[in-house]
């Protein structure tokens, strides 16, 4: 087996281990009937979603939850990228842009982002002081196709 195949076998094993820790159908059923955020979070903390909800509370706003979940996703993407062969790490890291399609749509339409969105490190490195996407920024970040440029 080539070194690249062995490296990808390691990545696959790590991803599958993470996949195995996801909630099962019974876990989703257990929490699906809970209507209040605080109660739902308490129920979710007892199962496999514990790591995903530990930073949230009943006082969390929609913005807090969105930023928190995206940060968790970016942590996972970084971990998978770290497992991968070095030639693939940049490509895997690039997938961190995909969950930002709604944000990028707002930028495509010429809109500025709210302050809490501009604070995201991935975006902050690309934005001007007013939260607007500068000319040519998509190409520099490698996301021109996502911006329609």
Image (cartoon, rainbow, N blue to C red):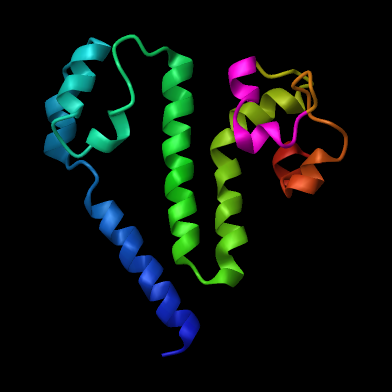
The answer to whether residue 110 is left or right of residue 12 is right
The answer to whether residue 101 is left or right of residue 85 is right
Tell me where the magenta segment starts and ends, as one range.
115-127
**Front residue (pair 50, 95):** 50
- Name the image quarter holding residue 126: top right
How many numbered marks have been drawn onto this rendered protein structure?
0
**Front residue (pair 73, 147):** 73
Relative height, residue 29 to residue 42 (above, below): below
Residue 146 position, x and y percent, is 69, 41
Q: Residue at x 47, y 35 (%)?
A: 71
The answer to whether residue 145 is left or right of residue 48 is right
Residue 77 position, x and y percent, is 47, 50
Outermost residue toward the bottom in this view: 1
Whether residue 89 is in magenta: the answer is no
Quadrant assignment for the N terminus? bottom left
- Name the image quarter holding residue 29: top left
Q: Residue at x 44, y 41 (%)?
A: 73
The answer to whether residue 104 is left or right of residue 85 is right
Relative height, residue 23 to residue 2 (above, below): above
**Front residue (pair 109, 138):** 138
Residue 88 position, x and y percent, is 57, 67
> Predominant secondary structure in magenta?
helix
Quadrant assignment for the C terminus? top right
Residue 24 position, x and y percent, is 17, 42
Q: Residue at x 73, y 26 (%)?
A: 107
Relative height, residue 3 to residue 93 (above, below): below
Q: Residue at x 77, y 39 (%)?
A: 148
């Amino acid at each position: 087996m080539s070194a690249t195949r062995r490296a990808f076998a390691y990545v696959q094993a790590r991803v599958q281990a993470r996949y195995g820790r996801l909630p099962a159908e019974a876990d989703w059923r257990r929490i699906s009937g809970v209507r209040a955020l605080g109660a739902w979070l308490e129920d979710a903390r007892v199962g496999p979603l514990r790591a995903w909800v530990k930073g949230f509370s009943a006082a969390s706003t929609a913005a807090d939850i969105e930023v928190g979940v995206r940060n968790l996703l970016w942590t996972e993407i970084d971990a998978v990228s770290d497992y991968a062969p070095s030639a693939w790490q940049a490509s895997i890291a690039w997938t961190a842009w995909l969950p930002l399609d709604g944000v990028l749509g707002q930028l495509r339409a010429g809109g500025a982002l709210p302050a809490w969105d501009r604070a995201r490190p991935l975006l902050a490195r690309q934005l001007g002081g007013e939260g607007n996407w500068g000319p040519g920024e998509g190409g520099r970040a490698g996301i021109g196709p996502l911006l329609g440029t």
